[in-house]
Image: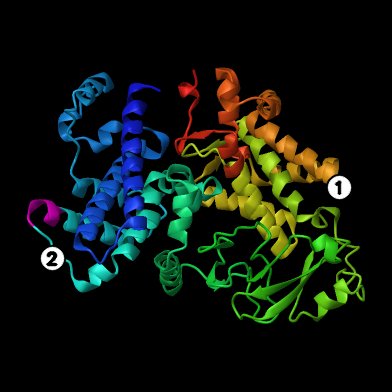
């Protein structure tokens, strides 16, 4: 860790420290007591200010501690700034100027007007409390806990994590972030509060009325909290790549039918679903011949399938469909992802904003489109266009050449969609992203961890594990001890 990273990490650790204090206050305080409201308001505002400074200094991965300091440090070297830091003499720019700076960074995912308004509200409270006094209205007191929870999940989380990591929800959800840095028990206590539910549902409802998202009923928690555009429940946070991808035959809305894809193969390739747009119950049948998902307006098709009365195939003959459009949906994820990863390694695609998750983003977009339209070519082209339009990549190769490589890989690798065939492709993708040598060492480290404690890893072994950490789910990371004291242990911290 260099000097600039050390200073940045100090800000982050301080923000997490105040976040933990704030969460404790939310859980244990009686907000009918004025002292509790005042104390928690100050802690929340301190958390916000530190999180804001961290996000700006992190600078989308191009760390610059000068971005949060006053003009006097403009011509200072990092060494000179570090000396001032050790003396506790650094002068940080005003909250007002830093807040205005964040407005100009488009990759931050929170709603600028609403979140900035909340930040300004707490800034005003904090200033009045520290410099004179603040008269809390009865409404502010009765809604204190709800407002505190809103700040944590809609401002602090984006600033500390989501805002600087493009497509960051592919890495860590808000709930996982709180579990890692505050603790699972504390998160579950927050989650059980009526105020948490109200905040999440209000956020969804606000975005819905602004026309930014479509909200439907989640089949997992039975609340009107499923966000169609991202295929995720904002309340229970259930997320499945196969959900919210099918066109409704009743209201004709695309990506509106959510269904449970788990164990379909044990129910004659059939399951039930619901349209989040028109709220009608549906049958979803996956064709055994071509893998296409067929949706019917009631549950009769599902009942006929599980009773063995129907064969679970397309209503029309699907034999003439080309091989590339008969793929199981997982292939529409992994094959384009492999091709894109190889293109990146060959410098045929330039990655912008230091985004390390390009293959996964492309694969997810392609798979979603493929399930909806059953056309690999359109799915891949749509995924590539998304990456370019979002300014995640720039192409040094024609889209048609990428598509041709996808076709060749399908011809080479797809035979029958067996489990071993699929796992082989995912292993190839992993090796392509991390390099084959690193990938093999990664699996060796995992094997060793079964027999040894995490702290017994060598520096080299840990660096391999750290590089490939995104291949592990959050529970595995915690089980292996990659998080100590609610912090992600870094290679430089292993002795």
Q: Is residue 353 a member of the stretch shown in magenta?
A: no
204 relative position to 257: left or right: left
- Sequence-first disc among 2 and 1: 2
Of 451 and 321, nearer the camera is 451
Q: Secondary structure at mark 1?
A: loop
178 relative position to 293: left or right: left
Depth check, mark 2 against mark 1: the one in front is 2
Q: Residue at x 25, y 22 (%)?
A: 82
Q: Position of residue 444 (x, y in %)?
A: 70, 25
29 relative position to 272: left or right: left
Q: Is residue 469 visible?
A: yes
The disc at residue 418 is 1
Residue bounds of the magenta highlight: 127-132
Q: Residue at x 32, y 59 (%)?
A: 148
Q: Is residue 128 a member of the stretch shown in magenta?
A: yes
Number of on-image labels? 2
Location of residue 313 (image quadrant): bottom right
Q: Position of residue 385 (x, y in %)?
A: 58, 52
Q: Residue at x 33, y 40 (%)?
A: 54
Q: Position of residue 367 (x, y in %)?
A: 69, 55
**Does 112 sit above or below residue 89?**
below
Q: How far is the residue under mark 2 from the one under mark 1?
A: 67 Å
Provide the residue designation for mark 2.
Answer: 135
């Amino acid at each position: 860790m260099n000097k600039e990273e050390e200073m940045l990490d100090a800000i982050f650790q301080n923000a997490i420290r105040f976040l933990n204090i704030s969460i404790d206050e939310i859980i244990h305080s009686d907000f009918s007591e004025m002292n509790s409201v005042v104390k928690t308001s100050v802690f929340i505002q301190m958390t916000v200010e530190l999180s804001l400074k961290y996000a700006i200094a992190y600078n989308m991965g191009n760390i610059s501690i000068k971005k949060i300091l006053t003009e006097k440090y403009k011509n200072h070297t990092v060494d000179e700034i570090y000396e001032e830091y050790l003396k506790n003499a650094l002068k940080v720019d005003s909250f007002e100027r830093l807040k205005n700076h964040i407005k100009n960074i488009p990759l931050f995912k929170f709603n600028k007007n609403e979140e900035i308004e909340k930040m300004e509200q707490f800034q005003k409270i904090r200033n009045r409390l520290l410099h004179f006094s603040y008269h809390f209205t009865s409404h502010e007191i009765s809604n204190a806990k709800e407002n505190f929870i809103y700040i944590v999940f809609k401002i602090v989380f984006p600033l500390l994590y989501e805002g600087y990591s493009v497509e960051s929800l592919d890495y860590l959800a808000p709930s996982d972030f709180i579990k890692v840095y505050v603790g699972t028990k504390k998160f579950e206590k927050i989650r059980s509060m009526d105020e948490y539910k109200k905040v999440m549902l209000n956020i969804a409802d606000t975005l819905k009325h602004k026309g930014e998202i479509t909200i439907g009923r989640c089949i997992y928690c039975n609340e009107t909290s499923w966000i169609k555009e991202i295929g995720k429940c904002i309340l229970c946070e259930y997320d499945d790549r196969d959900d919210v991808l099918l066109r409704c035959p009743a209201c004709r809305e695309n990506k509106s039918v959510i269904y449970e894809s788990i164990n379909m193969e044990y129910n004659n390739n059939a399951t039930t679903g619901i349209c989040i747009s028109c709220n009608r119950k549906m049958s979803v049948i996956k064709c055994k011949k071509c893998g296409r998902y067929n949706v019917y307006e009631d549950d009769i098709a599902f009942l006929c399938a599980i009773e063995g009365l129907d064969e679970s195939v397309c209503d029309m003959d699907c034999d003439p469909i080309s091989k590339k459009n008969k793929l199981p949906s997982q292939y529409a994820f992994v094959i384009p992802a492999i091709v894109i990863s190889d293109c990146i390694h060959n410098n045929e695609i330039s990655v912008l904003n230091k985004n390390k998750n390009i293959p996964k983003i492309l694969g997810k977009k392609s798979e979603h489109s493929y399930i909806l339209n059953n056309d690999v070519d359109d799915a891949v082209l749509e995924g590539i266009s998304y990456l370019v339009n979002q300014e995640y990549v720039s192409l040094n190769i024609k889209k048609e050449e990428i598509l041709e490589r996808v076709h060749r890989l399908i011809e080479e690798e797809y035979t029958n969609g067996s489990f071993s065939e699929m796992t082989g492709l995912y292993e190839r993708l992993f090796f392509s992203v991390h390099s084959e040598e690193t990938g093999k060492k990664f699996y060796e480290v995992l094997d060793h961890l079964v027999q040894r404690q995490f702290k017994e890893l060598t520096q080299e072994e840990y660096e391999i594990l750290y590089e490939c950490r995104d291949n592990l789910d959050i529970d595995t990371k915690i089980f292996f001890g990659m998080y100590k004291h609610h912090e992600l242990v870094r290679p430089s911290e292993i002795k």
